[in-house]
Image (cartoon, grey):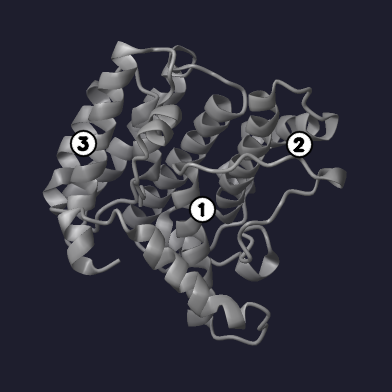
Amino acid sequence: MTFEQVMEGSIIDFRVHLQGISNFQGPRRKWQVITAETRQLNTQSAFLNLLARTTSSFTPSPWLPNRELRQREQDSLTSNDNRSYCYEFTFGITADIAAAIQEITDLYECLQFYRQAQAPIPEGLLEACEDLGDRLLSWTLSADKVPSFNDRGTDELDIFKHHSHAWHGAALIFYLNCIQGAKPQDLVDEVATVASHMLAVEEIKSKHIANQMAPISWPAFIKSCCALNREPWEAWWLDVQKYGIGSIRRQYTIVQEIWSEMDTNSSEGWLQILHRRDIQVLAA
């Protein structure tokens, strides 16, 4: 992805770029003695591939024995080698929540295999779904393993706290929506909470941060798609147009299209609309 593509919003070929990075990294995947910069690149590319997976069409896969999920990505976000602090400082998310999003995506692909086949869901898969839900419900930032922000200002720490809670709230709604089948009307409070954190980030930045960076938009994109009360999200998307990032404009256009389709046919969810229309989006 080039800078011009991000600015213009013409990043529909992002999968080619992500695959190119994966191909470049391929021969080096087993290397253990690498620089911090290489480790950070590996972590960032794995995470961007994960974000792409959350909105992509996929081939449903059966649950493997012994609660082992098929590993599509060689760079596992849950491995100790990839627990990099670049999650917090680059994306505003903790490594544990990043790993939870990967697990949600893996479990959803397995669940869809049995849902589409109208077959019984294996007990091991049901247990894995329940365990993940319990971990998301019990998550607290204070209990997570996060780096120290002592060398950074109060504003940066406050922004990280809001971002991390937004990511957690978005991951929880992603889980409830995809795994537990919750509908938008069941998620009103959770969606509003995520909106409050995302809006708070922009408010802090507008008052105290001179060199502002555009936000990572996955929590906003996913939760906008689940929103019944759309005013807070409309305010957020309109506010972040100030960054002049074309990919953000494109995401908001897609969100509006999803809202329109869901208003017409409420039985179809946002992810089904993306898949049916083969909409390519990287919410990052």
Above or below, 162 against 76 in this view is: above
User: Which residue in the protein does label 2 denote?
Assistant: 128
The residue lying toward the viewer, choosing from 44 and 138, is 44
Is residue 14 in sight in this rendering? yes
Classed neighbour count for the residue bearing mark 2: other residues with Cα under 10 Å, few (<14), some (14–19), many (≥20): some
Q: CA distance from mark 3 to mark 1?
A: 22 Å
Kind of residue at disc 3: Thr
Give the mark nearer the N terminus: 2 vs 3. Answer: 2
| Badge 3 vs badge 1, beta-carbon distance below 8 Å | no
At x 64%, y 61%, the residue is 76
Task: Please provide percent x and percent y for residue 30.
Answer: 68, 79
Is residue 40 in sight in this rendering? no
Q: CA distance from mark 1 to mark 2?
A: 19 Å
- Image quarter of residue 269: top left
User: Which residue in the protein does label 1 denote?
Assistant: 50
Classify residue 33 as left or right of residue 13. Answer: right
Give the mark nearer the N terminus: 1 vs 2. Answer: 1
Q: Residue furthest front?
A: 117
Give the mark nearer the N terminus: 3 vs 1. Answer: 1
Task: Please provide percent x and percent y for residue 250.
Answer: 21, 44
Classify residue 110 as left or right of residue 10. Answer: right
At x 61%, y 28%, the residue is 179
User: Which residue in the protein does label 3 denote?
Assistant: 253
Q: Residue furthest right?
A: 66
Kind of residue at disc 1: Leu
The residue lying toward the viewer, choosing from 218 and 206, is 218
Counting the numbered discs, the total is 3
Q: Secondary structure at mark 3?
A: helix
Classed neighbour count for the residue bearing mark 1: other residues with Cα under 10 Å, few (<14), some (14–19), many (≥20): many
Above or below, 180 against 29 in this view is: above
Kind of residue at disc 2: Ala
Classify residue 1 as left or right of residue 122. Answer: left
